[in-house]
Image: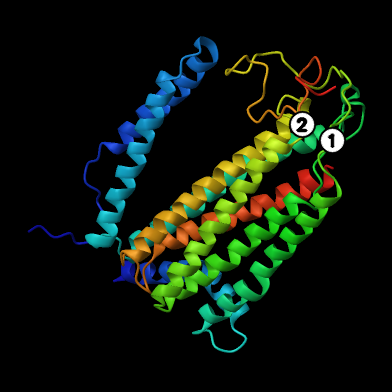
C-alpha cells in the first residue's frame, strides 16, 4: 500500500468534468437550436447529461469524503473556501439583475410614461403573497439553524425533523411563487418591468429549487448516518447556500416588490 | 518545523473566521447554555417562525376575501405586450404562465371576456 506524506487529497482521474463540459455545450447550443429551429432534442440531451454528471460527480465526492476518509481538515478548509467563492460569484450574478432593475426604475424613460411602475402595469400587492413568501423563507432560516445545532449535538431525530421542515418550507415558497406567476396581471413581455421582474425573481426561484434539492440530499445523508457531530460540511454548505437564497429574496422583496410598486 | 508552525497559524486564523458564523449563531442563541442551542432554535421555530408564517397566511386569506381578481382595463399601450420575437412554444403569442383572465394579448383579452 502506498502512503502519502501530506494531508491533501490527490483526486483519482474522473470523466465527470468532461461530461459536464459536454453537457454545457449541448445545453447552450441546444437552446439556440430551440429558438431558431424549434427542436428540443439537443437541449434535452444536454440536460440529461448534466443530471447524470451531477449525480455521479457528487456521489463520488461523498464516497471519497464520507466513506474513504479523504476529507481531512485541510481538505475541508479548501472545500469551505470553494463554497464561499462560489456563493460570492452568485452574489455578483444577482448584482447584475439588480443593476438592470435600478437602471430602468430610477430613471424611467418617456416610452414607459416617465414613471415607475410604468403606465399600464398593475403591480402585485407586496403585503399579500410576497409577504407570506418572506415569512416562509425567514422561517426556513430558523429551522435550518435548528437542524445545524441538532447535528452538532448529535440529536438525530431532531435533525431529521428540522431539515424536513426546512425543505417543506422551501417547497411551499416555490408553490406560492408558481401561483403568483400564474396570477400576475403582467408578463415577461411587458416591457422592462416584466423583464426585470421575471428574470430576477425567476433566477431566484431556480436557486430556491437548487437549494431545496441540496437540502434534500443532506436529509437523505443524515438519515443514512453520513454526518457526525464534528464533520458535516455538506450540510453546512447547503445551509450557507440556503441563507444566501434567503438574503437574495429579501433584497428582491425590498427593491422590486415593495419600493418598485 | 517552520512549515508546521505557519500551517498552524493560518489554520487558526481561518478557523476563527469560518467558526465565526457558528459562534455568532451560538452567541445569538445562547441565552444561557451554548450546548443546548438546538433547543433554543427549536423553540424559536415553533413559537416565532412558524406562527409568523401562519399570521401571514391568515392575512392573505382575509385579503383574498375582500377582492377577487378584477381584470385590469385593456389599453393597447405600445410599450407593453412586446412581441418582437415569438415565444418558442405554442402559437408564439402566449407567455409561459399565461392567464386568460388577467393577461391580455397584444390585441386585447382572449376568449369569453369583454
* On screen, residue A175 above or below A202: below
**Marked residue chain, label 1:** A
User: Disc number at residue A95?
Assistant: none
Q: Quadrant of the C terminus of chain B?
A: top right
Would residue B6 appear left or right of A34 to someone viewing this image? left
Mark yes or no: residue B71 visible.
yes
Of A104 and A144, the residue lying toward us:
A144
Q: Are marks 2 and 1 in contact (CB under 8 Å)?
A: yes
Of A63 and A41, the residue lying toward us:
A41
Label 2 sits on a secondary structure element that is: loop
Would residue A247 appear left or right of A85 to someone viewing this image? right
Residue A140 x, y percent position in the rendering: 59, 62
**Marked residue chain, label 2:** A
Rate crowding at label 1 as few (under 14), some (14 to 19) or many (20 or more) other CA atoms within 10 Å: some
Q: Quadrant of the N terminus of chain B?
A: bottom left
Of A83 and A214, the residue lying toward us:
A214
Residue A218 x, y percent position in the rendering: 41, 59
> In the displayed image of the protein, which residue is found farthest to the bottom?
B32
Rate crowding at label 2 as few (under 14), some (14 to 19) or many (20 or more) other CA atoms within 10 Å: many
* On screen, residue B73 above or below A226: above
The numbered mark, 2 or 1, whose residue comes first in the sequence reads: 1
User: Disc number at residue A186?
Assistant: 2
> In the displayed image of the protein, which residue is found farthest to the left?
A1
Residue A42 x, y percent position in the rendering: 40, 20
Label 1 sits on a secondary structure element that is: loop
Q: Residue at (85%, 46%) from the top-left corner?
A: B67
In the picture of the structure, the residue carrying the numbered disc 1 is A122
Amino acid at each position: 500500500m502506498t502512503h502519502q506524506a501530506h494531508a491533501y487529497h490527490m483526486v483519482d482521474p474522473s470523466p465527470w468534468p468532461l461530461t459536464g463540459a459536454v453537457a454545457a455545450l449541448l445545453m447552450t447550443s441546444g437552446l439556440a437550436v430551440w429558438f431558431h429551429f424549434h427542436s428540443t432534442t439537443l437541449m434535452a440531451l444536454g440536460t440529461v447529461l448534466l443530471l447524470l454528471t451531477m449525480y455521479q460527480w457528487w456521489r463520488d465526492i461523498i464516497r471519497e469524503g464520507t466513506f474513504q476518509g479523504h476529507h481531512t481538515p485541510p481538505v475541508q478548509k479548501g472545500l469551505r473556501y470553494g463554497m464561499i467563492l462560489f456563493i460570492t460569484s452568485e452574489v455578483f450574478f444577482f448584482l447584475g439583475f439588480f443593476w438592470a432593475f435600478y437602471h430602468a426604475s430610477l430613471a424611467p424613460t418617456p416610452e414607459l410614461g416617465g414613471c415607475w411602475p410604468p403606465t399600464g402595469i398593475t403591480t402585485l400587492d407586496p403585503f399579500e403573497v410576497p409577504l407570506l413568501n418572506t415569512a416562509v423563507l425567514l422561517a426556513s432560516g430558523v429551522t435550518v439553524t435548528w437542524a445545524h445545532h441538532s447535528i452538532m449535538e448529535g440529536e438525530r431525530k431532531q435533525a431529521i425533523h428540522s431539515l424536513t421542515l426546512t425543505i417543506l418550507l422551501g417547497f411551499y415558497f416555490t408553490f406560492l411563487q408558481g401561483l403568483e406567476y400564474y396570477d400576475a396581471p403582467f408578463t415577461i413581455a411587458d416591457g422592462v418591468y416584466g423583464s426585470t421582474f421575471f428574470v430576477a425573481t425567476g433566477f431566484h426561484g431556480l436557486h430556491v429549487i437548487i437549494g431545496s434539492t441540496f437540502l434534500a440530499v443532506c436529509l437523505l445523508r443524515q438519515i443514512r448516518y453520513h454526518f457526525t457531530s464534528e464533520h458535516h460540511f455538506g450540510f453546512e454548505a447547503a445551509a450557507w447556500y440556503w441563507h444566501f437564497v434567503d438574503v437574495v429574496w429579501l433584497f428582491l422583496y425590498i427593491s422590486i416588490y415593495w419600493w418598485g410598486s | 518545523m517552520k512549515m508546521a508552525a505557519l500551517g498552524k497559524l493560518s489554520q487558526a486564523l481561518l478557523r476563527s473566521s469560518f467558526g465565526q458564523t457558528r459562534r455568532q449563531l451560538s452567541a445569538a442563541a445562547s441565552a444561557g447554555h451554548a450546548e443546548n442551542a438546538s433547543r433554543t432554535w427549536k423553540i424559536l421555530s415553533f413559537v416565532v417562525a412558524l406562527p409568523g408564517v401562519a399570521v401571514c397566511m391568515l392575512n392573505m386569506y382575509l385579503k383574498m376575501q375582500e377582492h377577487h381578481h378584477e381584470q385590469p382595463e385593456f389599453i393597447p399601450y405600445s410599450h407593453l405586450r412586446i412581441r418582437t420575437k415569438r415565444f418558442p412554444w405554442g402559437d408564439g403569442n402566449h407567455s409561459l404562465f399565461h392567464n386568460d383572465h388577467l393577461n391580455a394579448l397584444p390585441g386585447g383579452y382572449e376568449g369569453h371576456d369583454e
